[in-house]
Image (cartoon, rainbow, N blue to C red):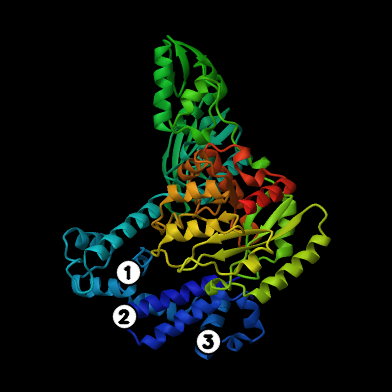
Amino acid sequence: MKNKEIAHIFNRIADALEFQGANRFRIVAYRKAARILEDLTEDVSVLAQANKLESLPGIGHAIATKITEYLSTGTMKKYEEVKRETPGTLLDLLDIQNLGPKTLALAYNALGVESLKDLKKVIKNGRLEKLPQMGKQKVNNIRRGIVLYERAHERLSIAVAEEIANELIAYLKKHARIKNISPAGSLRRWKETIGDIDILATGTNGKEIIKIFTQFPHVERVLAAGTTKSSILVRGGVQVDLRIVKAGSYGAALQYFTGSKAHNIRLRNIAKSSGLKLSEYGVFRGKKQIAGRTEKEVYKILGLACVPPEIREDRGEVELALKNKLPKLVEHSDIRGDLQMHSTYSDSEATIAELATAAKDHGYEYILITDHSQSVTYAHGMEPRRLHRQWKEIDRLNKRLPTLCVLKGVEVDILRDGALDYPNTILKECDFVIAAIHQGFKHNVTERICNAMQNPYVDIIAHPTGRLISSREGYHVDLRTVMEVAAETGTWLEINAYWDRLDLNDINARAAQELGARISIGTDAHDTKGLQWMKFGVATARRAWLESKDVVNTYTLNKLRTARKVNRKK
């Protein structure tokens, strides 16, 4: 569906027009068109083919013509025009949180700001703060937005990094004589963002493997190509390093290049205290290699249980490994269902039946449909009439699905005044209720979340900090208080598995578990492909040291329902 793509373009046109000081009504028209397309549950291209675009409220002939133009040509003249009329890369700077078109225009006209470098300079020398309607607090907010913007552009999301690594590994396995191959570094530890991608391999002819690596179809530039190591830039300027090691050193090299640095230092100190030497080439007693072929062998010779890559961060795992008391981390195969999914009843591209079919293919026992409540109009939130119509469809669907149960839920909004977006008379009819904040990020967030958890029908708090890794810090929320109330009320806290949220993150999820709260994982899927994001949620749970008993998605359906009833009683 092109709905969101065209909506983004209309918002960018509105940004450019606002920057240029254009007529307010033109700006509003584009913003309104963007909002309509974002809320639209039908495919805009289907409406265009049926000549029904102008039947949409707020879509006039001029806007409809631009939509048709983009659908047929892949470009929009108006968008290209405003980009030409806006200096340099200024439109890209609007991705910085807290920096709007009017502020950017002020900085451009008064101070000549045309780039991120210019913006940072006028913040540092204090000139931006002195402009009318600016002030210290507003500039501090922009400064924080720049930090997030740069972090997102310097590091890859785990999803992008994994996709590139998997594609490259599959390519090498197909075309080169590879015996062992694996990603390493922060990607293998499943960190939420990745710098460069590291790949480690063994094979019979390192020089041949390097040559094939540099011929990867998406290579933009070869940085280095030796006999055992090569570096390339792939699409988007992402650097990938490949190392070829000897089979007898593969385990030691994989351990070393996986890291983390702090974890490796601990291992080297343990080796040293035993009169051994640990390096990427193996474990040595004097000049004799005594281990290194496998990671398990390396850890064993040092007197440790093999530590899962996700928790190699020197956060206590070494001490437990020495005592052979590492937690048995939750596995992807333990997951029995997905506890946050959206359908076409709100803002998804997938029907409930399509989500159910995809869930069956994943081997799930249940899924929870959690479309948005009525106040979230930008996501086509459901008024009670549509919610009840959805439930009837779910009832019909469940009669045809002997191996999968589709649970009736809702992602109910926690409003600015602390009330929930539906009354209890509706919430008590749900199988499970997720509560979330989508508005009023600066309005008593902690109090609102805690009040929601006191409601006997609220089972889960979705994305508890509200952050977006690439662009948004999240709410000002006292997480410890939220975790304590969650433990007290039996409310589950979510790890949102969408790769740009991963909220709760690993640190916070571990803290929640230690305070007695249980965790749910939801993909927040808005299409059938979104179900694949469960792997990121599970990886985050593993980085949080969670076991299957800590994650409610590992429960059977009967156990899940029983746990829900306990929560209601509390």
Label 2 is placed on what type of residue?
Answer: Gln
Residue 334 pos. (x, y %): 67, 41
- Distance Cα–Cα, label 3 vs label 2: 23 Å
Tag 2 secondary structure:
helix
Quarter assignment of residue 376:
bottom right
Residue 311 pos. (x, y %): 50, 34
Residue 364 pos. (x, y %): 72, 49
User: Which of the two residues, 453 or 236, is positioned nearer the viewer here?
Assistant: 453
Q: How many marks?
A: 3
Residue 40 pos. (x, y %): 59, 76
Q: Which residue is mark 3?
A: 58
- Distance Cα–Cα, label 2 vs label 1: 11 Å
Label 3 is placed on what type of residue?
Answer: Gly
Q: Name which of mark 3 and mark 1 comes first in the sequence.
A: 3
> Taking 422 as reference, is 502 above or below it?
above
Q: Residue at x 65, y 74 (%)?
A: 384
On the rendered image, what quadrant is the N terminus found in?
A: bottom right
> Taking 297 as reference, is 113 above or below it?
below
From the image, state whether disc 3 or disc 2 is nearer to you.
Answer: 3
